[in-house]
Image (tube, rainbow, N blue to C red):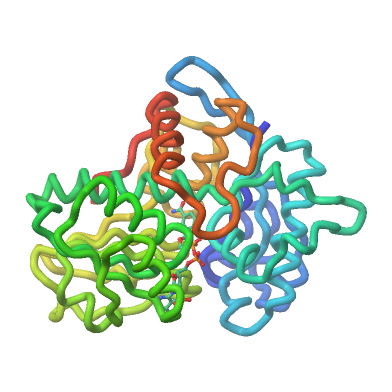
Amino acid sequence: MFGLIGHLSSLEHAQSVAETLGYAEFSNQGLDFWCSAPPQLVDSFHVTSITGQVIEGRYIESCFLPEMLINRRIKSAIRKVLNAMALAQKSDLNITALGGFSSVIFEEFNLKDNNQVRNVELDFNRFTTGNTHTAYIICRQIEQVSAQLGIDLASSTVAVCGATGDIGSAVCRWLEKKNDVKELLLVARNRERLDNLQAELGRGKILSLEEALPEADVIVWVTSMPKGVEISLETLKKPCLIIDGGYPKNLDSKFNHSDIYVLKGGVVEHSLDIDWKIMDIVSMDIPSRQMFACFAEAILLEFEQWHTNFSWGRNLITVDKMQLIGEASIKHGFSPLVSF
Ligand code: NDP
């Protein structure tokens, strides 16, 4: 059995869906209440591969909210992730994906040093960040959608915002090895990490966000921002493809321009319906089939019986591993979301 640990995108979102998740008493409560709420196992479902194999899964709502980071409730955020992992392990889940901010918090606050959660000694082999599959799917989205829009990658400038992150650096490696894009722009805040990435890739131009965006034909947005940012439409190239891979969505998607295309990044569609209710809550267009690619990674690891932390640590994702999980993704009937 596999597991998915997820969270909602904001306090407002959490209040509006509390009843659907099975705890109506949370719907009028503020951040303090969510800080003290324990993780909840809220959904059980089956996933059928196109090979005919059927597996069973559970969804755990960690009750983490991005406002905990914005309002410096770091201890609560850490507790949410560790408690949800302990619940997954106690529920006998073989492999569980740490969705959205869960893996960012795990790495940022070094939670590998905290493997004792009350009477549960966490076995990190049972967890995956899901970032290898996410990075693979984002790269396939870049390739497929730019071709649909007539954007030739070999003569294009691609800006990766969050380039030094786990997903961003993997996307850069793939683009460098497979696509030979004309210009690769590396955007993040920490200069040392940017210099290291540039040295590893042997290419890439380090620019600020303000400098990079107007130059880009394709913008890949994979920063770990707890709330969205607004970018000015006027400064962008037309046409421009934006792949928004963050969760919560990093970009304020009120774009209304016929030549600016914003695609939900890191989202996959399965070929067969899944009997879950959780994707209604996170507003997927086809909730019975669409999901975050990190969740799909846990599903793939369970299908393949690869009960190991396939994606773990930071900036260790190789193109070979992306290729491997990509082959499993196709084999079991997943495809990247390529429609707007
Ligand atoms: P990391 O923490 O590894 O990387 C985050 C990157 O964003 C770093 O390069 C960081 O560099 C940069 N960054 C953070 N804040 C800013 C800022 N204000 N301006 C510019 N750059 C910034 O995160 P991951 O790679 O693990 O995840 C990235 C995003 O993807 C997250 O939003 C996560 O929730 C989402 N995600 C989506 C999944 C899906 O299935 N669709 C799956 C997993 C994650 P620096 O700090 O130096 O600025």
Q: For the point 42% across and 42% down, which residue is it?
A: 322
The x and y percentages for residue 8 are: 56, 61
The x and y percentages for residue 259 are: 10, 63
Quarter occupied by the N terminus? top right
Q: Is residue 265 visible?
A: yes
* Quarter of image, res 64: bottom right
Q: For the point 43% across and 49% down, which residue is it?
A: 134
Q: Is residue 163 above or below residue 296?
A: below
Nearer to the camera, 327 or 277: 327
Q: Is residue 324 above or below residue 28?
A: above
Left or right for 145, reference 84: left
The x and y percentages for residue 234 are: 13, 80
The x and y percentages for residue 197 are: 39, 66
Q: For the point 54% across and 28% down, which residue is it?
A: 47
Nearer to the camera, 64 or 120: 120
* Quarter of image, res 215: bottom left
Left or right for 69, reference 247: right
Q: Is residue 280 above or below residue 101?
A: above
Nearer to the camera, 13 or 74: 74
Number of marks present in the image shown: 0
Q: For the point 40% across and 54% down, which residue is it?
A: 170
* Quarter of image, res 88: top right
Left or right for 292, reference 59: left
Q: Is residue 302 above or below residue 279?
A: above
Instruction: Please identify the residue farthest to the right as the structure is shown.
Output: 119
Q: Is residue 44 visible?
A: no
